[in-house]
Image (cartoon, grey):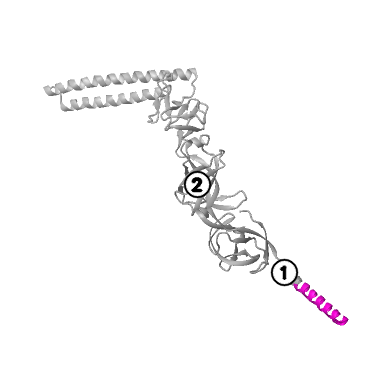
């Protein structure tokens, strides 16, 4: 039989073991709760997203070719036009209004100049006949050579006086009537009623398309080069996107572009046609200077999908600079720096195992892993700073990707 003292000793030993076990258990660190995600294989894209603006591919600025008096423009922005369609009626510049006395004096100067021109023309006829008579007499030996030369000189003087009289008549008439300069872009308007001394000319559309803007609507005097209308074909649109210079170097001709937030339900497609080689400094809304480069992309979606899209509309452009349909990917929050590369913690049997990985492309919150992981591996997202290789972990909610 066990003695009373022996029982007491066993009880003390058991109590000591329990105390030691409790102390040891107390020093064992508890599992760290962590957030995890699974490495998956799927489609992955790297995109550059910027806001842009649409523009017609071929823009025609219709301007006044000469100084003229423009009739009221009845066209409205959005109206369709065809090549050669009349756009603007132009008349010669109107002279300042004359008072009755000045008008009578101007008319009298015209009459006087006309009479002088007629007299000079008659004198030319007389000197021609006189020269012919002198030639016959010279051939008969009745006049000298000097007399014949004098007759020829008188004819030249008469013709010069006639030309001067005609020029003075033209100047006198210009003071009363408006005259057109010669310009090949203007055609006579046979349908418009012509005022005395006034010829209406037509400025026609250079191409088929739509009226984009009307710069001058009311009639009045216009100067050479003054803008009147803008014409363009909205079926042939392109997008101008200012891209950061560090992103522009990754965009090349032929890069695919998705256009969103243009107002329609469909995503529109475009293709990069030109990346300009001259950057410029742009100040952002936050006051930061940015170096940006203009990228031009041509829409390839059928016009039927974008009938209401015009020039100068805002769009959101996504340039697809890289794409892989079978990329092994994990959240970027699982990555942390390790020496000169990257590493992750993989949750295995409720322990954190550190692994060195090779990272390929990164797109937003997702990164491509080219080595170090396999499909289905569970990685720890946003690992705590105190987490070490081999520590126990308690995987919690999986991170959304």
List x then y, in percent, for residue 94: 46, 24
Instruction: Find the magenta span and give its range.
Output: 1-24
| Classed neighbour count for the residue bearing mark 1: other residues with Cα under 10 Å, few (<14), some (14–19), many (≥20) | few
Looking at the rendered structure, the secondary structure element under dot 2 is: strand
Image quarter of the N terminus: bottom right
Q: Is residue 9 magenta?
A: yes
Q: Is residue 268 above or below residue 23?
A: above
- In this view, the residue in front, 380 or 155, is 380
Secondary structure mostly taken by the magenta-highlighted segment of the chain: helix
Mark closest to the chain's N terminus, 2 or 1:
1
Residue at 24% x, 25% y is: 155
Name the quadrant containing residue 30.
bottom right
Name the quadrant containing residue 357.
bottom right
Lateral position of residue 159 relative to residue 266, left or right: left
Residue tagged by mark 1?
A: 29
Residue tagged by mark 2?
A: 257
Looking at the rendered structure, the secondary structure element under dot 1 is: loop
Q: Is residue 94 above or below residue 394?
A: above
Lateral position of residue 163 relative to residue 341, left or right: left
Q: Distance of mark 2 from mark 1, alpha carbons? A: 52 Å
| Classed neighbour count for the residue bearing mark 2: other residues with Cα under 10 Å, few (<14), some (14–19), many (≥20) | many
């Amino acid at each position: 039989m066990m003695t009373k003292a022996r029982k007491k000793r066993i009880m003390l030993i058991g109590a000591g073991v329990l105390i030691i076990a409790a102390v040891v258990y107390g020093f064992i660190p508890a599992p760290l709760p962590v957030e995890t995600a699974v490495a998956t294989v799927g489609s992955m894209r790297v995109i550059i997203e910027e806001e842009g603006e649409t523009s017609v591919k071929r823009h025609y600025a219709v301007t006044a070719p000469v100084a003229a008096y423009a009739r009221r423009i009845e066209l409205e922005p959005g109206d369709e036009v065809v090549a050669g369609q009349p756009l603007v009626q132009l008349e010669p510049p109107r002279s300042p209004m004359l008072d009755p006395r000045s008008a009578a004096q101007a008319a009298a100067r015209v009459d006087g100049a006309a009479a002088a021109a007629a007299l000079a023309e008659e004198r030319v006829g007389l000197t021609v006949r006189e020269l012919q008579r002198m030639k016959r007499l010279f051939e008969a030996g009745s006049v000298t050579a000097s007399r014949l030369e004098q007759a020829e000189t008188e004819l030249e003087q008469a013709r010069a006086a006639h030309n001067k009289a005609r020029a003075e008549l033209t100047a006198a008439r210009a003071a009363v009537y408006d005259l057109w300069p010669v310009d090949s872009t203007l055609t006579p308007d046979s349908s418009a009623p012509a005022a005395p001394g006034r010829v209406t000319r037509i400025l026609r559309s250079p191409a088929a398309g739509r009226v984009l803007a009307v710069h001058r609507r009311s009639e009045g005097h216009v100067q050479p080069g003054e803008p009147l209308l803008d014409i363009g074909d909205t079926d042939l649109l392109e997008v101008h996107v200012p891209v950061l210079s560090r992103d522009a170097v990754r965009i090349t001709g032929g890069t695919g572009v998705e256009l969103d937030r243009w107002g329609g339900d469909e995503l529109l497609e475009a293709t990069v046609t030109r990346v300009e080689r001259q950057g410029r400094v742009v100040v952002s809304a936050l006051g930061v200077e940015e170096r940006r480069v203009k990228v031009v992309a041509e829409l390839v979606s059928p016009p039927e999908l974008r009938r209401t899209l015009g020039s100068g509309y805002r769009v959101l452009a996504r340039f697809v600079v890289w794409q892989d349909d079978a990329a092994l990917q994990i959240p970027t929050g699982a990555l942390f720096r390790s020496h000169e590369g990257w590493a992750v913690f993989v949750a295995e049997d409720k322990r954190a195992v550190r692994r060195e990985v090779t990272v390929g492309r990164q797109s937003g919150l997702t990164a491509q892993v080219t080595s170090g992981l396999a499909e289905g591996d569970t990685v720890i997202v946003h690992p705590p700073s105190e987490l070490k290789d081999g520590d126990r972990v308690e995987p919690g909610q999986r991170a959304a990707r």
